[in-house]
Amino acid sequence: MVGGGGGGLLENANPLIYERSGERPVTAGEEDEQVPDSIDAREIFDLIRSINDPEHPLTLEELNVVEQVRVQVSDPESTVAVAFTPTIPHCSMATLIGLSIKVKLLRSLPQRFKMDVHITPGTHASEHAVNKQLADKERVAAALENTHLLEVVNQCLSARS
């Protein structure tokens, strides 16, 4: 473990870094305001791929924490499911990462959507406990009332300079 920019110790001091996927080209159908534009997995991935990791100056996509193949969307049923994979099995930031993904989706999607943000099965030691916290609307709301925690989430969601 090495010292991090936040004054603490990094759990995964030398993570693998993955190449970013390209930007999605905009189609003529998407530009046509007369055609209903349904929300798909790529659109959700585009929303969450640039979320910053709380420990590293890298995005969740660059750390392979989020991948488009782990995003499921049903626009007609108004459901979105995102599985994320922490970089190490004992990552203490897993809840914060999941909360950041959930907040980004809550702020970006129409209210009709029901969101399920969870850890990819078998990739974290406390998977069940973290998933339970992320699925509990009252716990999420209470977490977002904590000004320090909200500030950290907002840092994860802000663009890097």
Image: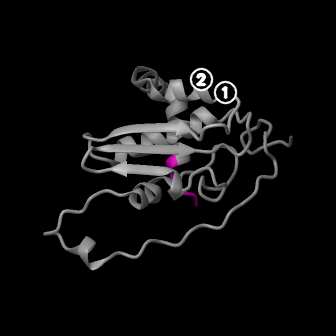
Residue visible at 71% across and 30% down in the picture: 125
Task: Name the residue furthest right.
Answer: 1
Quadrant position of residue 91? top right
* Image position, residue 41 (x, y; %): 41, 57
Q: Quadrant of the C terminus?
A: bottom right
Who is closer to the viewer here, 67 or 17?
A: 67
Q: How is the image coloured?
A: one colour
* Quadrant (top left/top right/bottom left/bottom right) for the N terminus: top right
Q: What is the magenta range?
A: 157-161
Asked if the residue under mark 2 is in contact with the one under mark 1, i.e. CB atoms within 8 Å, the reply is yes
Residue 156, magenta (yes or no): no
Along the horizontal axis of the image, is 112 left or right of 85?
left
- Measured as percent of width and height from the top left, residue 126 is found at 66, 27
Q: Residue at x 63, y 45 (%)?
A: 85
Within the magenta stretch, is there residue 160? yes
* Category of crowding for the residue at label 1, using alpha-carbon neighbours closer than 10 angstroms: few (below 14), some (14–19), many (at least 20): some
Is 89 placed above or below 25 here? above
Residue type beneath disc 1: Ser
Q: Is residue 142 above or below residue 94?
A: above
- Residue 50 visible, this angle: no
Classify 18 as above or below 76.
Answer: below
The image shows residue 108 at horizontal and vertical percentages of 35, 49
Residue 126 is labelled as: 1
Q: 77 and 25: which one is in front?
A: 77
Quarter of image, res 122: top right
Q: Which mark is residue 129?
A: 2
Q: Secondary structure at mark 2?
A: helix
Type of amino acid at the residue the image marks with label 2: Ala
Q: CA distance from mark 1 to mark 2?
A: 5 Å
Predominant SS of the magenta segment: loop
